[in-house]
Amino acid sequence: MESRGSVMKTRLDFDGPGPVLDLGGVMVHPGWLDTAAQAAMVEDLRAVIREAPLFQPMTPRGQAMSVRMTAAGRYGWFSDRSGYRYIPAHPAGQPWPPIPDSVLAAWRALVSQVRMPDCCLVNFYTGAARMGLHQDRDEADFGWPVLSISLGDEALFRVGTTTRGGPTRSLWLRSGDVAILGGAARLAFHGIDRVRPGSSALLPKGGRINLTLRVVD
Ligand code: MD3
Ligand code: FE
């Protein structure tokens, strides 16, 4: 477990325009996607969800998660009584659809033009859906950052340190914001406390989509 716990320098092919906000390795680019780009991405995601319908993962303790999920790419993240893991096909059996080019473009611009992500996890929040504080540690190489894209209603994001129970900071993530989670933040505890209903007109029925792009193996 030694290497899983160590944080390597985040790999970036080049330095893009500076982020407006840097919370110790959480680099937020507010409004990186304009409204037209957000709407185009939502259309691409509708096609993903038609091929790979949203499902509600069960935690290893047998509780249904309040966030619904699906994925695109070589792997999707999954959880059930057997634990958390990446799987190469949707739970219904079909392969995950490819990651849309509109989504890959953000990765190419902000992370790498050489190594593409293996997984685009799609999280869909409605109503009181939330995500408790957790670490993302199911990936093989924490040297790669996670790229997050927020679409739709605003969400109160909380990020702490690499120790559970350490101090946390909160910020609202808004539609079009792109965040890069790398460096020391790669293994920070983080979660979504709540979503603000009616705060965005992007999705006609409301709710929030979060995409996370990850290198898995
Ligand atoms: C900080 N998703 O899917 S994205 C997740 O908004 C997840 O749906 C949240 O946490 C969401 O695992 C937060 C921002 C994010 C993603 C990965 C991180 C923050 C992170 C990894 C390390 C530290
Ligand atoms: Fe996470």
Image: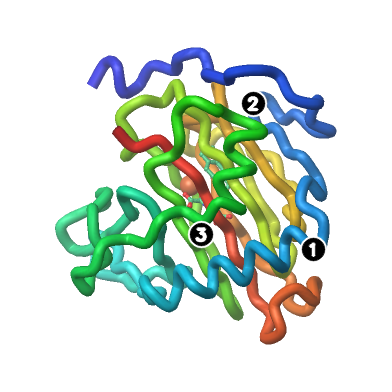
Tell me the quarter of the picture where residue 161 sits: top right
Q: Which quadrant, please, contains the N terminus?
A: top left
Q: Which quadrant, please, contains the C terminus?
A: top left
Report whether 6 appears left or right of 95.
Answer: right
Mark carried by residue 36: 1
Mark carried by residue 66: none
Q: Is residue 119 above or below residue 6?
A: below
Between disc 2 and disc 3, whose residue precedes?
2
Query: Is 73 or 158 nearer to us in this picture?
Result: 73
Disc 1 is placed on an element classified as helix
Q: Is residue 31 above or below residue 57?
A: above
Disc 3 is placed on an element classified as strand
Report whether 7 appears left or right of 127.
Answer: left
Mark carried by residue 131: 3
Q: What residue is shown at x 73% (from left), y 38% (from top)?
A: 28
Q: Is residue 128 above or below residue 110?
A: below
